[in-house]
Image: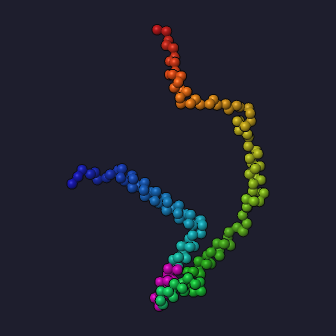
Amino acid sequence: MGNFPLTNEPLLTIVAAVVKRYLQSLLCLIAALHLVGGHWGVMQMVAWAQMLRDYSQDRSLVEAVLNTLDGEHPCPMCLKIKAGRVQEEKQRPTSLPKADQPGSWLMASAVALDLPEPPWICGEVSMGFSAPRSFFAQHIDGPATPPPRGGA
């Protein structure tokens, strides 16, 4: 049959890393979706799918799609989603500090003025670097002279 061990540690490590990476990506996607309000969109799509299923049982598919998406025939779930969106909008702050308002960047500049200047700007310390020798110049001079040997 083959000489295979019952547990293959490198394979398990690779699979665990792939699963971990997949779960991290999924969690980041869900968090980003929630931050931009995508949870309302997902719930609305579920509501539309249920409406389409319900309407298509007694009407043609074209009429079911039109009645689902026209906004004149909302289902109870659509009404709850709309109420939830309105409630969320009411809870948001009405005014956020804008970058073009002087108060927001004046504070940042005041904090920056309190910081000490770095030594290379002050002039107290000179930051002198010698220019690097080119590759050829290093080899034209020949090898470095070895240090003198101690008296033998």
Give how far across and how far down residue 148 sits, in percent. Answer: 51, 14
Does residue 9 appear left or right of residue 101 in this picture? left
Which residues, given as a range, are shown in magenta?
Answer: 48-58
The quadrant of the image that shows the N terminus is: bottom left
Q: Taken as a whole, is the magenta stretch helix, strand or loop?
A: helix
Vertical relation: 72 (above or below) 102:
below
Write the residue at 54% across / 26% down.
138
Was residue 56 drawn as part of the magenta stretch in this picture? yes
Report if residue 128 lies within the magenta region. Answer: no
Q: Is residue 152 above or below residue 32?
A: above
Horizontally, residue 49 falls left or right of residue 83, namely left
Indicate the quadrant where residue 67 lies.
bottom right
Farthest residue in the left direction?
1
Above/below status of 86 relative to 27: below
- Rendered location of residue 137, percent (x, y): 55, 27
Q: Please say if 12 is above or below 54.
A: above
Which residue is depicted at the point 72% across and 64% down? Answer: 96
Is residue 103 or residue 126 the one in the foreground?
126
Identify which residue is drawn at 76% across, 44% down: 114
Counting from the top left corner in percent of width and height, residue 24 is at 49, 58
Residue 107 image point, x, y percent: 76, 53
- For this orientation, the residue located farthest to the bottom is 58
Specify how the rendered protein is coloured.
Answer: rainbow
